[in-house]
Image: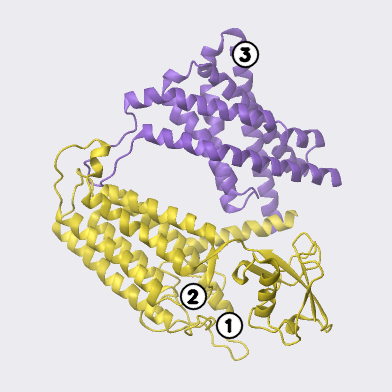
Amino acid sequence: MAGFLSVLRRIYLTLYNWTVFFGWFQVLYLALKTLKESGHEHVYDAVEKPLQLAQTAAVLEILHGLVGLVRSPITATLPQISSRLYVTWGILWSFPETRTHILVSSLVISWSITEIIRYSFFGTKEALGSAPSWLLWLRYSTFLLLYPSGITSEVGLIYIAMPYIKESEKYCIRMPNKWNFSFDYYYAAILTLGIYVPGSPHMYTYMLGQRKKALSKSKRE
Amino acid sequence: MKVTLISRSGKEFIKGGLELNDSATVADLQEAIYRRTKKYYPSRQRLTLPLQPGSKEKPTVLHYKKSVKDYCNGNSENLTVMFKDLGPQVSYRTLFFFEYLGPLIIYPIFYYLPVYQYFGYKGERAIHPVQTYALYCWCFHYFKRIMETFFVHRFSHTTSPLSNVFRNCAYYWTFGAYIAYYVNHPLYTPVSDLQMKIGFGFGLVCQLSNFYCHILLRNLRSPTGNGGYQIPRGFLFNIVTCANYTTEIYQWLGFNIATQTVAGYVFLVVAALIMTNWALAKHRRLKRLFDGKEGRPKYPRRWVITTPIRVEMNGKRPLGPLDSAAYLKDVVREVNSHLD
């Protein structure tokens, strides 16, 4: 029974990783193609659907961590996926005014390269039992450049969206109401930016630790 | 006898080690360390027996009441002990006092002072009776907690890391301000008179029950707090393992029924999750300790914290939502072990 379940788990994770890999590959291809042909103003329109699908599919990773299907701690996965979903849906999808900015291109390229490497690494690992050393090196080294560029783009886009958030009053709940609750999306955006300040270095140092561990382990083997 | 102290990295912590009497206790060893280092007072020290490299076992912690000789393996002249600095410590009374003092001060500020002017609400504020009763209820609750800290609770651990003060204060003070902001808001919508009475009435009954639970728990421990684990009995403890948490959760439920704020319910859910984790740990610990073997009493069949959550009552079959999740996790862990 356990043997069958382990095979089932591997098949599922292989399918999941390669499906999302192709989603991100499509995002990168469309982004670069549009960037070359039409300019950065049209990048978002070209990648919108595959970007939303690929990014939202990452919610399953939280679920995988929760039920113990993968070993990655939820404390590392949750903030990363939450922030990306917030930018994808809460900023880019909700406020079209931000879509033509150059930062959308840098964001999409940073995300897609990171994810193409990551999902192909895990996909290969699940399918074959191990990943080639060059892919392992890429998985734990490209973030050194792509994390800062991705995070800068995320923070930049939230900041750019703020005047539009304030003006539109979108997603705001005002008192009085039966449940005595109010919510201001503008202040939520400020809070999110505040979380990025300690959160980004924390994630970066966490990844540096993971890199050290993974690369030293591969050297020993 | 000679005690060699090493740090976790394996380096000698005190050059040349320490010379102790053969009758010395672990407490004497801790005092000797403090005298030599001038920095690491006993409650800041964690002394363990060193493990073999690569060992997955939990290290043996040296108990301050025991003799140092008890930890010597045949060789009574030399002992190697691993030292870990636990960081600055504060007494639990200090920790609890400051974490409960915050809500006790913050909440009335929102009720009495014109803070809402700074949030853009000008003009007079009509105060509803429910807001006044909520203030009394809130202040009574935290005053009760402070009084219990000083006069009721007996602590098994004397100190807590200083960092916990900041973490716990952030939790209580933030939630205190968050709830106070909405309950005392000028645009607050009160519930019906009947709902208010039911909520506060139920909350008060639960507060008094909670106090009685704490009295029962106090009587399980010796005045020094070193009674060890005992099976709690009497009142709601005959039904649930952690009746003190049950009454705490229901007391906040009563408060929220009366005040009806999303902020209050968020606090209730977070607090309930934290307390459920503690309760599950305590339940498992008591079941493990009181297994009915070698003359030990068997831990009776009981709910953990609230009636839907029960652990391993009927063999391995999961009962209740939390157990189903735990069961699923165990299955996955088993699968992963096969993969490894």
**Pointer 1 indicates a residue of which chain?**
B
Do badges 3 and 2 share one subunit? no
**Image mark count:** 3
Q: Secondary structure at mark 1?
A: loop
What is the letter of the purple chain? A
Q: Amino acid at mark 1?
A: Asp
What is the letter of the yellow chain? B
Query: Which of the 4 image quadrants contains residue A16?
Result: top right
Q: Residue at x 61, y 61 (%)?
A: B87
**Pointer 3 indicates a residue of which chain?**
A
Q: Residue at x 54, y 82 (%)?
A: B228
Label 3 or label 2, whichever lies nearer to me, is: 2
Q: Amino acid at mark 3?
A: Lys
Of the 4 image quadrants, the one containing the N terminus of chain A is bottom right
> How far is the residue under mark 3 from the one under mark 2?
66 Å
Residue A122 placed where, x, y %? 70, 39
Q: Which mark is residue B32?
A: none
Q: Amino acid at mark 2?
A: Phe
Q: Which mark is residue B155?
A: 2
Q: Which residue is mark 3?
A: A33
Q: Which residue is mark 1?
A: B291
Upstream in sequence: badge 1 or badge 2: 2
